[in-house]
């Protein structure tokens, strides 16, 4: 009985994976290209201000009917 | 549903398109509609055996398209209902005479000249020309999905392609739901699937071994089985919702009573 509370439900994991894969399917973009995009984006932005070394978060998200590209790129503070 | 010509499709194979076409078609006919079910899975004909009509096939869809017979001659009357007809797929490998224009013309004739109320088009698996031909004559769609990863993904793709064809009346059938797995958290719930795919639900069909039994003898379960939580009732309810009746969805999920109680979400139409 206790196992029921410890184990993450497999369907929740599946739901997360499906949401992610469908956001790429719908945008007709392969997930691997997202890394390329992220690197190019960082190179461009770094020309304007210093960026933190890591903690980047770049992804596609479904917002209601629309697919949005979300980039969270922390700026280095002096 | 307003659509008189409805394609039954899924992307992935083996999820229950043919079973759905036979059972919903039979139930619609039993309710008094004049119905034709069309098998467009050329080369892999199966709707005839599922309906128990395999012995009566003389002419098929390709014969109609090639002008080898008149449309009327290729319509096979069901043995149980005088309102139900089958237009079989051909078993040839040659699909060259399949065309969207011929498909549209045939369905239009059935509705306008032959006086049928509803045409259900059983689509082949895939997203290629077979699916496109089946969808080309449809104004609405029943998308059949199983609550598992590849079926949901493929359904999403199909829904996108239906939208691209401007088929707007798209309804979801969740087939082969297994309540005990949902209860354990090992199968997507109905609400999960609806949230992910974002289309309206028209029916939930449980996994039911009686489907195999009824298919073995070529007698649709929607005509033969009346158990309250069985697939037969689920298919009959889908037919009723297609004709506009507002039937609440049965809940096969744990939250309420023991697999029973009613879902008051999403009406039919
Ligand atoms: N709700 C269900 N419960 C049990 N078996 C099912 C159910 N729906 C379909 N099946 C079985 O699954 C198999 C594939 O169904 P079928 O209708 O031929 O799929 P498709 O036309 O999408 O390829 C068949 O053997 C059928 O009897
Ligand atoms: Mg089939």
Image: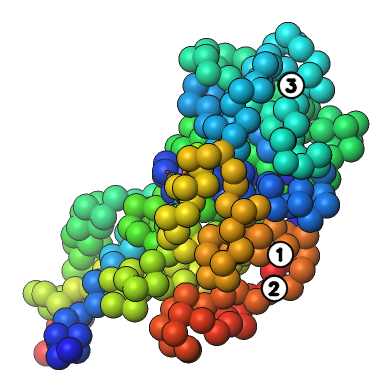
Chain where mark 3 sits: B
Name the residue carrying label 3.
Answer: B74
Instruction: Tell me what residue is drawn at x 73 percent, y 27 percent.
Output: B76
Chain where mark 2 sits: B
| Apparent side of residue B114 relative to residue B78 in the rendered image (left or right) | right
Inter-mark Cα distance, 1 to 2: 6 Å
| Apparent side of residue A56 relative to residue B195 in the rendered image (left or right) | left
Inter-mark Cα distance, 3 to 2: 35 Å
**Residue A27 % position (x, y):** 41, 55
Residue B234: quarter of image: bottom right
Per the image, label 1 sits on a secondary structure element best described as helix
Chain where mark 1 sits: B
Per the image, label 2 sits on a secondary structure element best described as loop
Q: Nearer the viewer, residue B139 or B59?
A: B59
Q: Do tag 1 and tag 2 residues touch (Cβ < 8 Å)?
A: yes
> From the viewer's perspective, is residue B180 above or below residue B52?
below
């Amino acid at each position: 009985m206790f196992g029921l509370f410890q184990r993450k439900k497999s369907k929740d994991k599946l739901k997360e994976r499906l949401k992610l894969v469908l956001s790429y399917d719908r945008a007709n973009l392969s997930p691997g290209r997202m890394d390329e995009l992220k690197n190019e984006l960082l190179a461009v932005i770094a020309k304007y201000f210093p960026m933190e070394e890591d903690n980047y978060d770049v992804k596609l998200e479904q917002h209601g009917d629309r697919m949005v590209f979300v980039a969270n790129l922390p700026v280095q503070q002096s | 549903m307003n659509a008189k010509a409805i394609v039954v499709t899924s992307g992935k194979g083996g999820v229950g398109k043919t079973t759905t076409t036979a059972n919903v078609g039979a139930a619609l006919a039993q309710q008094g509609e004049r119905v034709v079910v069309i098998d467009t899975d050329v080369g892999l004909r199966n709707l005839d055996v599922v309906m128990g009509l395999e012995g009566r096939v003389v002419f098929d869809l390709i014969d109609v398209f090639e002008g080898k017979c008149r449309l009327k001659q290729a319509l096979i009357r069901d043995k149980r209902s005088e309102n139900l007809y089958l237009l079989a797929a051909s078993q040839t490998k040659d699909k060259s005479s399949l065309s969207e224009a011929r498909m549209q013309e045939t369905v239009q004739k059935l509705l306008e000249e032959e006086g049928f109320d509803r045409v259900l088009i059983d689509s082949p698996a895939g997203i290629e020309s077979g699916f496109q031909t089946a969808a080309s004559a449809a104004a609405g769609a029943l998308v059949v999905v199983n609550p598992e990863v590849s079926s949901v993904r493929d359904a999403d793709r199909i829904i996108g392609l239906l939208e691209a064809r401007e088929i707007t009346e798209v309804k979801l059938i969740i087939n082969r739901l297994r309540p005990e797995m949902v209860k354990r958290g090992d199968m997507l719930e109905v609400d999960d699937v609806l949230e992910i795919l974002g289309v309206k639900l028209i029916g939930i069909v449980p996994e039911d071994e009686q489907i195999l039994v009824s298919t073995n003898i070529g007698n649709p379960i929607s005509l033969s089985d009346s158990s309250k939580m069985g697939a037969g009732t689920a298919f009959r309810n889908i037919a009723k919702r297609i004709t506009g009746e507002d039937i609440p969805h049965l809940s096969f999920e744990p939250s309420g009573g023991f697999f029973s109680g009613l879902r008051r979400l999403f009406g039919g139409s």
